[in-house]
Amino acid sequence: MRSIFKFITPKLVILAIMLCSWQGCTISYKFNGAALDYNVYRTIFVSDFPIRAALVYPPLQQTFENELLDYISRNTRLQIVDTSADLQLEGEITGYSLSPQAVTEDAYASRTRLTIQVRIKYTDNRQEGKDIDQTFSAYRDFDSSEMITDVQDDLCMQISKELVDLIFNATLGNW
């Protein structure tokens, strides 16, 4: 009985592939997470992301913008342009805050949380109803015995990567 399945199964797979190609079916896989039709979408405009938070860490803007542009370049075939485009991604960094976490018995915080918020306005100039206006937030905790100035660069990079991933999935990833 097993020998029959060994003989029949490969032939059925080949037959199914032939039928699909004859009927005009196509099988496509997208391993990068992007759900874009590159026949429709060819360009994207990504604006600057100014910091509009009460607490400002100037290098954050450049860190976030670079991470966003690099991620789009690595994971799509979209051309990033400086003028009107098929897709537009605009926004601002609206929050940069520190808050105490994990208070110990002597009423001191043993951990501190750095939270960053980014407001995104995503505009699809090719199809109506796909626009997004949303705020994304991510955070990292660090030991309160460390100075924020010592860990700030690394935390901002980690948080920026997470925010870019969230933004990509909600906009270009079309999850």
Image: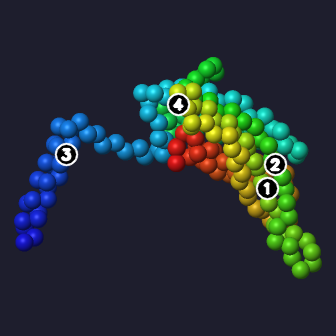
Task: Name the secondary structure under disc 3.
Answer: helix
Horizontal side of residue 161 vs 107, given as left or right: left
Q: Residue furthest top?
A: 83
State which tag comes first along the sequence, 4 or 3. 3
Q: What residue is shown with label 2?
A: 96
Instruction: Tell me the CA gap for discs 1 and 4.
Output: 37 Å
Q: Residue furthest bottom?
A: 105
Residue type at mark 4: give it. Gln
State which tag comes first along the sequence, 1 or 3. 3
Asked whether the residues under the numbered discs 1 and 2 touch, taking CB atoms below 8 Å apart as contact, a structural biologist would say yes
Asked whether the residues under the numbered discs 1 and 4 touch, taking CB atoms below 8 Å apart as contact, a structural biologist would say no
Horizontal side of residue 79 vs 68, given as left or right: left
Residue type at mark 2: give it. Tyr
Q: What residue is shown with label 4?
A: 127
State which tag comes first along the sequence, 3 or 2. 3
Instruction: Tell me the CA gap for discs 1 and 3.
Output: 52 Å
Image quarter of the N terminus:
bottom left
Residue type at mark 1: give it. Leu
Q: Residue at x 18, y 48 (%)?
A: 16
Instruction: Tell me the CA gap for discs 1 and 2.
Output: 7 Å
Instruction: Tell me the CA gap for discs 4 and 3.
Output: 33 Å
